[in-house]
Image: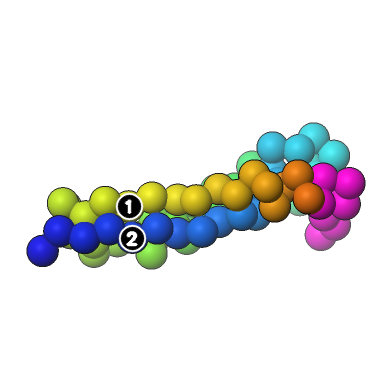
Amino acid sequence: MTGQIQFDDPWLCFYCDENIRANIAKAGKSADEHVATFVRALNACMAGTQDDMTVAIHLCRSSFNEVSSMYVTC
C-alpha cells in the first residue's frame, strides 16, 4: 500500500540563525547536537514505514521570519 506522510518541523529552521546558535552556545549546549537529536527523532518516527511511502518534512520558514527578532534561550 503506497502512502504519504508529512512531518511538520517549524523549529528546525531556527538552527540556521546565528543569534539562536550563539544563545544555545552561551547556555553551554551545542546547536549541532540539538539538530542531531531532531534528526534521530524524525528517523525514529519514519522507521518501519513502507519502502514505497513518500515521506516529507515541512520546514516552515514563515514561522522563523515571524519570530526572527526573538532569540531562543535554553
Residue 34 shown in magenta: no
Do residues under tags 2 and 1 come within 8 Å of each other at their CB atoms? yes
Indicate the quadrant where residue 38 lies. bottom right
Q: CA distance from mark 2 to mark 1?
A: 5 Å
Judging depth in this view, the residue of 58 and 14 nearest the camera is 58
Q: Residue at x 33, y 60 (%)?
A: 5
**Left or right side of 44 for 33:** right
Residue assigned mark 2: 5
Q: Main secondary structure of the magenta part?
A: loop
Is residue 13 shown above or below 46?
A: above
The residue under the point 23% across, 64% down is 48
* Amino acid on which the number 1 mark rests in the picture: Val
Residue 37: percent from left, percent from top: 55, 55
Q: Secondary structure at mark 1?
A: strand
Q: Can you give x and y, in whole percent of width and height, for residue 2 in the image?
A: 15, 58
| Left or right relative to 8: residue 20 | right
Q: Residue at x 21, y 60 (%)?
A: 3
Quarter of the image for residue 49 reads bottom left
Direction left: furthest residue? 1
Residue located 10% across and 64% down the image: 1
Read off the residue under disc 1: 55
- Quadrant into which the C terminus falls: bottom right
Is residue 48 shown to the viewer in this render?
yes
Total tally of numbered discs in the picture: 2
Q: Amino acid at mark 2?
A: Ile
